[in-house]
Amino acid sequence: MISLLILWPLYIIGIQAERGGWWRLITPVTLVAAALDIILNYTELTVLTWDRPRHGEYTFSVRLERLQRRGDWRGTIARFIEKYMLGPFDPDGYHVKVR
């Protein structure tokens, strides 16, 4: 799970590119973070959640949308990740959109 310690800071840095201005200079970081996110979504994050990505859930954020609606431990983990690890750093205040 050490690669998660790399993915999370890359997310924090990369998501700032949405703010515009000088933040756009870190766009290459978002490309690295996106590639790592896709790889981890199908490997380590599958083990962490004991849930395989469904068709179209290429990134962990997309899979978290589905997992947040669950009432079991997976939903609890997904809501925790959004509330404390992803949402506070997103310029909109939330990263995972719940439909």
Image (tube, rainbow, N blue to C red):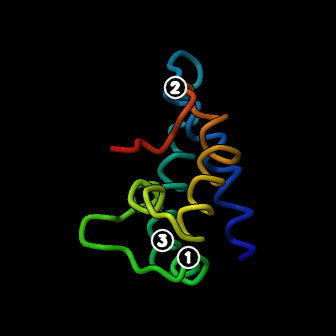
Q: Earlier in the sequence, mark 1 or mark 2?
A: 1
Q: Quadrant of residue 90?
A: top right
x, y (%) of residue 50?
52, 83
Q: Residue at x 71, y 50 (%)?
A: 9
Q: Which mark is residue 92?
A: 2
Residue type at mark 3? Asn
Instruction: Name the residue nearer the viewer: 32 or 5.
Output: 5
- Element marked by disc 2: loop
Residue placed under numbered mark 1 in the picture? 49
Distance from disc 1 to disc 2, alpha carbons, whole Å, reads 26 Å
- Relative to 6, is 98 above or below? above
x, y (%) of residue 84?
70, 45
Q: Quadrant of residue 4?
A: bottom right
Quadrant occupied by the C terminus: top left
Residue type at mark 2? Asp
Residue placed under numbered mark 3 in the picture? 41
Which of the two discs, 1 and 3, sits closer to the camera? 1
Q: Which mark is residue 9?
A: none
Q: Residue at x 54, y 70 (%)?
A: 72
Q: Residue furthest front?
A: 71
Residue type at mark 1? Thr
Q: Quadrant of residue 12?
A: top right
